[in-house]
Every structure is written in structure tokens, then in C-alpha cells.
Amino acid sequence: MTAAFPAPQAASVPRWSTPPAGHTHGLLPAASSPVATPADTARWRVHLLGGFVLEDAAGPTHPTHPTHRTRLTRLRSRASMALLARLAMAPGRAHARDELAALLWPDAPAQRSRSRLRQTLSLLRAVLEPPGGPQVLQADHWVIRVRPGTLWCDVPAFEAAAAQHDDPAALALYRGELLPGLAEEWLEDERRHLAALAERVHERHRRSAPAAPDRPPAPGERPGARSTRPARCDETVPVTARLPAPADASFGRGDEAAALRRLLAARRLVTVVGPGGIGKTRLVLDALSSSAHGLGPARFVDIGGLRTLHHVLRRLRATLRTPAGPRALDALTTTLDATPGTLVLDGAEALDGPARAWLAAALARMPALRCVITSRLPMGWADEALHPVLPLPLPVVDDATDLAALAAQPAVALFIDRARAVRPEFHLHRGNAGAVVALLHRLDGWPLAIELAAARMHLTNPAMLLSRFAEPPLAAPGQGGTGDVLGDLTRRGPRSAGRQANLLAVLDAGLLMLPPASRHLLQRLACPAGGPPEAAQQAVLRAASATALAPLVDGGWLSPCRHDAGGCRLGHLVRRWVWLRWGAADRGGAETAAGVPISDCRCAAEALCPASD
């Protein structure tokens, strides 16, 4: 049976079980509750709320780190992060080894889980206790604990601030949910407890905060008119509606984020459009995460997959914490209109006609509110401003010989960063640079495809993965394409249940939103008749009707041409997927693509690819 925390009752009630009375094995006395270590005296600072950060608190003057300060956003394994979280959240407690093993590996036999715990503890000690550094973890055969004063963690600090009614400090510490992206049963229990506590603190702080003094009326303004001055974000935005904290670094979107901020400053309704996995949500988060954007407090509502008005209203009320009842719609619009800012509606492509019509009418009633929507297709509103998201720029082939310049290009930097998440020793060198460049060209610079390919680097290498793209795109019977290389681009582990866990599923979902004429045009573009593929595609595009072409252009299915600044083409990634979906019924068409063998459809970067990693 999986071990889990008891149900939380209040912030001051310990949720941590105590070792059996009389436990005196080895070095470690028992402790009954979490103890918060002062941040200015701890050796390490562990941030778990809103994302994982492990920071060396000793700073540049520490004898073992004379020139730099360590700051890690991930560890070698997710088990290491979970173990550190468990220990850091209760640093004054002696944790039984059997309890930790059952908690972290509930489905493994007891002997195997204890062996994994020993290995994970060794990996964690290698990070926390570098040569010459102080001891951080104390362990004997029965228990493990944190050496007093060596770790500061934001979770017990947040709980302590909440218990002392220091609401500003508590709200500053709660940057988001506990370890987003890490799926553990005991973490889910803790997430619910901490989110509920943060909501109570937020409400208590809102009720106790004095009303802001009315400013003198501006020249020409009617005395007593309602002020439109935006309030502070932490006072007006419920915890459930705050911008989620990204778990990973972003690359190559700085200029686009600035452009999106400028567009939002000029236009109040903006739709960020692009295909699934292109980075729409991340771009919006990057644009609004800066406190100096001047767009007021931001509220984030995930409506991905919702279709009907009923489900959209339920999600809005639950996220924005507005009351239900006969006047629920009025309460919702009043809440949004009372504190002007920016409303983010993420994933609106599935909304049906009534839901879109109500949303347009509701936003028209709130002229002081800005709204940014992410969608695979435009909303179709008259006052809508579009911000298309393009793939990351492809690395230049000539730069494959300059490793520093190559590693600085956004697509390459993203691939390296995500590969190191599963294979920490991964690095770019002359033996794999050409394969990385060629692989990124095959993936057309799509961030999701790059991330999923990089996540395979613990099982393969760039050259081996690239070689699979030279194979015919064949779907094994009953597997729906999972036997193809695109079927391998799938998240494993805790993040495998997300909306973007499977590349084929993301592409298939976008296909269902296209009209039949656009689907037929996709098929013709993937298998053009006569001439080189790109030139033949241009002939098909010139002859296509605007009705069929517009959804492909608006939805980002077509990539910019390499040789024509204003042209577009069907990229390698989408082309292979179209072959996989339509070519399975026609083996000859799939393998030869109307006279153009797939082995001949090569990008120029593959000439630099060596035979090995």
C-alpha cells in the first residue's frame, strides 16, 4: 500500500508521522515536525513552489566554490528530486528508510526499492556534499535526515509564515504549485494542502488589506468615478488563476515576447495562433512573466479541450473563484472588470460557436480588460489581432563547424538543454554536431518535436535517431503509426499524461480541425507530382483555392521557404506525418511520394552528419 501523508487540518498541525517511540538507532534522534532553517545560515536553498531550484547559499566566497554559485533547476533523476523534496520539507525529522522506499517506489518489491533508495541517496549526496564541503545528509541503516542548519526550503518557510499570519511573506514564497510536472501520490496530497493554505492566506490578506485611498480626480473626470488603477497582482489574482511557472528554460523567444507585449499594449484582443507544440503558451508566459510589462495583473485560465459554453463557464468560475448561482455570469464579468489587467485563455481552438459568441460578447462588456488567447486557429472576431508563432530558426549548416556559434542558436540550445535533463553528460562536439543540425532540420524547428527528440537521448544518440528519418514512414497494423520514428517522440514518466505528451496525437488533433478541402490539399502537398519536392509544392500552392489554403496558413501547417522570403512550404515533419496517415493505405505512394523516393528528400545539413555519435 502506498504511504501518504495524513489529510491536512490546519497550517499549525504537523502532517508528518513520527518514528516509533524509543527510536535511537545510530546517529539520528527522532523529530516530530518540520523545522524551518533560516535562509541566511543554510548551506543550500531548496525552492519547490512553482518549480524546482537548488541554490548554493554559500555564495562565491565559499572555499569549495571560489568562482561561482551553483544553481540547478533539475537533478540527474526525478527520484533524486522527489527524495530531496521529502527531506527538505521536513528537515528536522528522521525519515525511516522503509517509509521513503515505499513512498518513492510504491510498485517495486521492498528489496528493490531499498536498493534504489541507496543509489538515489548516493546521487543526491554527490550534489549536496562536493569534495571539501560540509556534510548535509546524515544516514544510518534505518533512517535518513538533514543535518540541522544545512538546508532551507520554501515549503516549511511558507507554512511558518502562514501560521504566524505574515501574509505578505507567505504570498511572496508561494510562487506556484509544488513541483509542477512531478507526478507522485504523496506530492498530490501536499499540492492540495499547500494550494488550499495559499488560498486561505490570500483571502485573509485581501480582507485585512486597507482600501487604497482615492486619488484626486483628474482634470475633466467626474468626482466619484470608479478608479481604473490596476491593483497589485498578489492582491487581486486568486492563486488558482496565477500564471503557471514554467519548469524549463526558454530559448529564442525574447524578441517575440517583446513584440507580443507591444501588440497587447496597442490592441486589447490578441490571439496567438500556431499549430500544437509550436510554443504558443510558453510565449505568452514569457511575455507576461515580467513585472514591468505594464499590462496589469495577469489571470491564466486553461480551457484546452473544452467545447461548450457550460464547461467554459464552469472552468472560469472555478479558476477565478467567482460564486455560482443565478447571477453567476454577472459576478464573473464584475470580477474581471473590477481590476483591469490581462486575461489569458489558453487552448481555445475547440470552442464551439455559442461559446465563442458568448466570450466575444462578454469581452465587449469589459473594455478595460485585455485578453490574449492561444489557439490553433483564429477566433474569427472582427476586432481580433493575430500574433502567429513560427518555428524556431533552423541552425545554419555552415555553423556546424563552429561549436560555440552553433550551441548559441535557439533550436540547438533547446535540444542540448532538454537532452541534459535525461542525460546530464550530453554535450555538443564535432562528432555529433552535424547529426544534431540535420535532426533539427528534419524536425522543422518545432519546439515540442525538439523536446521529445531530446528526451530520447538517454536511449539513443542524434545520429541513430536521424537515421530513422531515412526509413519509409510505415504504420504497423493496429499501432496507429507508433512503429514509426514519429511514434517514438512521446513523453515518458510523470509528464506522459499532458496535452502535449505525444507528437502524433498533437498532429492528429490539429487534423480534425481542418476542413476536408484543406486535408486534401495537405495530401497533395505531401506527394506533389513532378519536379523537386519544394518546386512541386509551390506549383500546388499556386493552384490551390483560398478556402483550402487559408486554414493551413492560419494554423501554421506550412513552414517558411528557405529560398523565398515570402513563400511557404510543407516541412519535413508535417510531410512525414501526412505520409504516415495517408500513405499507409497506398504503400507505393508512401514510399515513393509520387515518383520522389523518400530517401531523396534530404536536407542539406545531412551532408555534415558522420556515421557515429
Image (cartoon, rainbow, N blue to C red):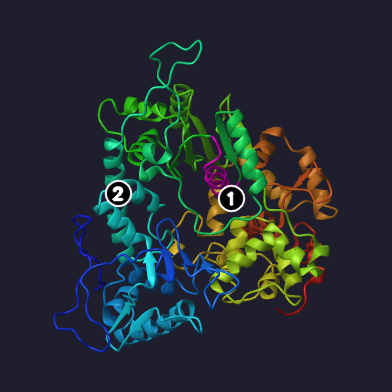
Residue at position x 37%, y 38% from top? 235
Using the image, determine if residue 262 lies above or below residue 528. above
- Circle 2 sits on which residue? 166
Residue at position x 33%, y 59% from top? 157
Region in magenta: 275-294
On residue 279, which mark appears? Answer: 1
CA neighbours of label 2 inside 10 A, class few (<14), some (14 to 19), many (20+)? some
The answer to whether residue 271 shows anywhere in this view is yes
The answer to whether residue 598 shows anywhere in this view is no
The residue nearer to you, when weighing 352 against 345, is: 345
The residue nearer to you, when weighing 146 against 20, is: 146
The amino acid type, in three-letter code, at marker 1 is Gly
Position of the N terminus by quadrant: bottom left
Q: Position of residue 554 (x, y in %)?
A: 64, 39
Left or right of 372 on screen, residue 178: left
Left or right of 82 on screen, residue 377: right
- Marks 1 and 2 sit apart, C-alpha to C-alpha, by 38 Å
Task: Tell me where residue 182 sits by quadrant.
Answer: bottom left
Q: Position of residue 76 (x, y in %)?
A: 50, 74
